[in-house]
Amino acid sequence: MEIVSTNKKARFNYEIIEKIEAGIALKGTEVKSIRNRNVSIGESYAQIKENEVFLHNLHISTYEQGNRENHDPIRVRKLLLHKREIKKLAAKVQQKGLSLIPLSIYLRKGKIKVELGIGRGKRLVDKREAIKKKAIEREIGRIVKR
């Protein structure tokens, strides 16, 4: 498994409850751009419409050697999941305050996959606690190194 891109903001802004792996329907130049690591998932999100899951705001840069066959960098992309997985996701997302967030894009056995997380948005107090905890862990790490 080779990680191509991660969404660092997602783990800070959301409490991840469950993770699921999904494939993406891509064009040829998109695949080549992703393999060159020209992808950003920082502002992306997933949405369920008519028993299908779509990924919005995923920015895949145009492929440099692609000519007229190049793709639109911010088009809506379909995620490939089984019907039972989509129904399970839809039931969970309908609960109050839950969202579908892409956590990372990676290569597995030559295929490009997205790790989706079902998450609940953190409050400002929770974010501050996470920052304090990280600072304390850094300080402990510095002391241990000495």
Image (tube, helix red, strand yellow):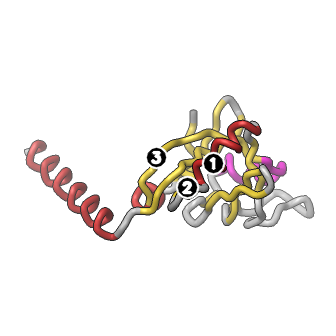
Residue 93 falls in image quadrant = bottom right
For this view, does 139 lie left or right of residue 130? left
**Residue type at mark 2?**
Gln
Q: Are marks 2 and 1 in contact (CB under 8 Å)?
A: yes
For this view, does 133 lie left or right of residue 117? left
Image coordinates for residue 128, horizontal then vertical, percent: 27, 66
- Residue at x 83%, y 51% (from the top left corner): 27
Q: Is residue 5 magenta?
A: no
Q: Nearer the viewer, residue 142 or 105?
A: 105
- Residue at x 12%, y 43% (from the top left corner): 145
For this view, does 78 lie left or right of residue 136? right
How far apart, in angstroms, are the residues tagged by discs 2 and 1?
7 Å
**Residue corresponding to mark 3:** 17
State which tag comes first along the sequence, 3 or 1: 3
**Residue corresponding to mark 2:** 95
**Residue corresponding to mark 1:** 91
